[in-house]
Amino acid sequence: PEVVKSICEAASKWGFFQIINHDVPIEVLENVKDATYKFFGLPAEVKNKYSKEHSSSNNVRFGTSFTPQAEKALEWKDYLSLFYVSEEEASALWPLACREQVLDYMRKSEVVIKQLLKMLMKGLNVNEIDETKESLLMGSMRTNLNYYPKCPNPELTVGVGRHSDVSTLTILLQDEIGGLFVRENNGDNWIHVPPIKGSLVINVGDALQIMSNGKYKSVEHRVVANGYNNRISVPIFVNPRPSDMIGPLPELIKDGEKPIYKQVLYSDYVKHFFHKGHDGKKTIEFAEL
């Protein structure tokens, strides 16, 4: 009960927290980190097969920065984005260098994701997660392998600009280098998220802020570039399905609480996020009433 309470509190005050003793085996986490280095260590022409121009599927994408066509300055980051459809598709399309390790990480994390969602729903007095609700909360998942190479002029750029995620929840594995900063909810202080070996960093995304009618807060975060080490991180984005309508959960507004968000098609929300550069928490305005 104490853990449940502190998780719900963290989700409403901070939007960010770290968990340990989460039951995802440490070797699964280590394997996915090794596989990330392995993929980014491949020759450019091999990685390029997965770029927007050459990838055989929109669900597998190798790229750089965030939205290069919309940004004034590029972010100092390469990534491989893997949208999970099925084991068959992953076996056919995901790069061999990291396929099994990412699938294993996603499988083993699923139990934790369900546990967290159950606790967070309980904090909203939503005690029953039926199939419909489960698919609304976690109907689709994407894993990114992020690579932040050592930067010759770190003061001139960022690893990732300030933004909040569009997910329900993000489960992040970071390495020991550090560099992730979270913005204090009502201030201008940026707080470093210290790497803790074996931990997972959890953050609330915009979709959960909308569904919780603002009870849980997604929060701005960014990654600084550094001049000393290469850094990697591996987030799993737990999302509604693109075809889902998201809005405040009916349980929350049945007793006369005013909704502060409208119902929006999740794929429209995501499109809005991706057609601009990172701009803090502006995306959420798209769903405000």
Image (cartoon, helix red, strand yellow):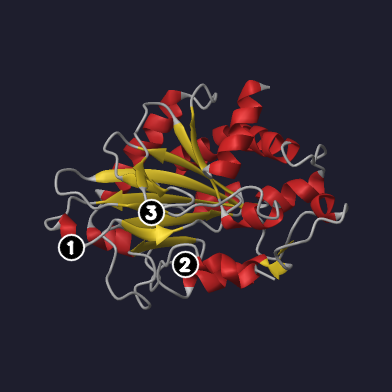
Q: Position of residue 57 (x, y in %)?
A: 50, 66
- Residue 87's place in the image compared with 118, above or below, is below
Q: Which mark is residue 156?
A: 1
Left or right: 108, with 253 as reference point: left
Left or right: 166, with 214 as reference point: left
Q: Which residue is mark 3?
A: 188
Q: Position of residue 160 (x, y in %)?
A: 34, 57
Sequence-first disc among 3 and 2: 2
Q: Amino acid at mark 1?
A: Leu
Q: Which residue is mark 2?
A: 56
Residue for point 18% across, 63% down: 156
Q: Amino acid at mark 3?
A: Asp
| CA–CA distance in space, label 3 to label 2 | 43 Å
When asked about the image quadrant of residue 243, the answer is: bottom right
Sequence-first disc among 1 and 3: 1
Residue for point 83% across, 39% down: 128
| CA–CA distance in space, label 1 to label 3 | 20 Å
Q: Are marks 3 and 2 in contact (CB under 8 Å)?
A: no
SS assignment at label 1: helix
Residue nearest the observer in this picture, 100 or 209: 209
Task: Answer whether residue 110 is visible to the viewer in this image.
Answer: no
Q: Are marks 1 and 3 in contact (CB under 8 Å)?
A: no
